[in-house]
Image (cartoon, rainbow, N blue to C red):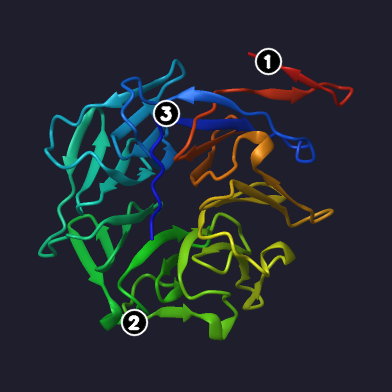
Amino acid sequence: MRVYFKLPFLLSILLITAVSGLQAQIPFFKSVQVSKTGVPLKINGICQDNDKFIWLATTDGLYRYSGGGFEKIVLKETTEPADVSSIAPLPDGGVIFGNRKGGIFKFLNGVVRAIPTGSLVVHSSIGGIAVSPQHEIFVALQGQGLLKIAGDKIENFTTQDGLPDNYLYDVAIDPKGNLWIGSDGGLTKWSGLESKNAFQNFTTVNGLPDNIVRRIDASAENSIGIGTEEGGFVIYYPGTNTFFIPEFFREWSKGSITSILKLENEYWIGTQRDGIVDYEFKGYKRTRQFTKNLGFEGVLVNCMLKDHEGNIWIGSGVNCTCRLERKLNSNGNLMEHN
């Protein structure tokens, strides 16, 4: 179930800076205004393209940040609904995005183009989108399985092909080229990507705390961060085929995990209604929460991104924070730079 927060003020996005050596410090947050019209919106997704533009997928359409603030992208080329549910960068520039009515589009060089889906009529909301270095596009359909687009070749994989469920939430590609899928049927790994029947499924029988997998971070070489509906956060180690549940999440009762961001030594885990949990998997392996004192109490954290400059952007359904960059000087003290 998706939760929407409507507020009487403008929505914004949180931005902080994560700098190596600052992990033990309390991060600084500052608001960045997204909408200038006062229209309530929710940030569903965030990415950065090759030109270093920050893009937001929102319930009020596409927004782009170029340094001076966010601008709304007017989609003149399409009459599709403005509710953009997912977004991802393309290898050669631009972005690909989808909406809750099943539309999939590409924005490149200032032009929006609908991406054809062949004989498949997509009527499901678009979940996660992943693009391989070979330009293969993988789309999680919430009700119609997995969509793969490779040039003119379009394929649709469902439970008939080995998926555990057709309601997919997220897709991610790891550094080895494996595709990871989160669904109402658990976690799925697709290794070769050349065979329909090569899906490897994981459920509570294999160690998952919950069979509904909402979010996946596959950016690490040897571990997969997994967010579930009711079982909290878990890490899967493919090398040993084991699941590890951090102690903080073993008695989880605070709703869905809605976003995951892996940093150098820690995972930031966005929650449905309790802000962000920072879990350090190296060193002291401590856990802390960014909640009430940092403005995250009762906040749905939908998406997070670390940009090319080290800033961390946090999109939520509550408020927005603006750009703040900090570095350590030679004495280890904080100093602000503009």
Q: Earlier in the sequence, mark 1 or mark 2?
A: 2
Question: Could you tell me residue 97's position as x and y percent?
Answer: 29, 44
Judge from the rendering whether residue 88 lies leftward or rightward of residue 186; answer left or right. left
Q: Secondary structure at mark 3?
A: loop
Q: Secondary structure at mark 2?
A: loop
Judge from the rendering whether residue 105 lies leftward or rightward of residue 219; answer left or right. left
Residue 178 seen in render: no
Judge from the rendering whether residue 17 lies leftward or rightward of residue 198; answer left or right. right
For disc 3, the marked residue is 53
Q: Viewer-proximal residue, 271 or 207?
A: 271
- Residue at the far right in the pictured view: 331
Tell me the quadrant of the picture where the N terminus can be found: bottom left
Q: Amino acid at mark 1?
A: His
- The residue lying at 27 percent from left, 75 percent from top is 158
- The residue lying at 48 percent from left, 45 percent from top is 303
For disc 1, the marked residue is 337
Mark 3 Cα-neighbour bin, 10 Å: few <14, some 14–19, many ≥20: some
- Residue at the far front in the pictured view: 8
Between the residue at mark 1 and the residue at mark 3, the CA separation in whole angstroms equals: 21 Å
Question: Could you tell me residue 292's position as x and y percent?
Answer: 65, 39
Q: Earlier in the sequence, mark 2 or mark 3?
A: 3
For disc 2, the marked residue is 162
- The residue lying at 35 percent from left, 35 percent from top is 41
Between the residue at mark 1 and the residue at mark 2, the CA separation in whole angstroms equals: 52 Å
Residue 130, by quadrant, is bottom left
Q: Amino acid at mark 2?
A: Gly
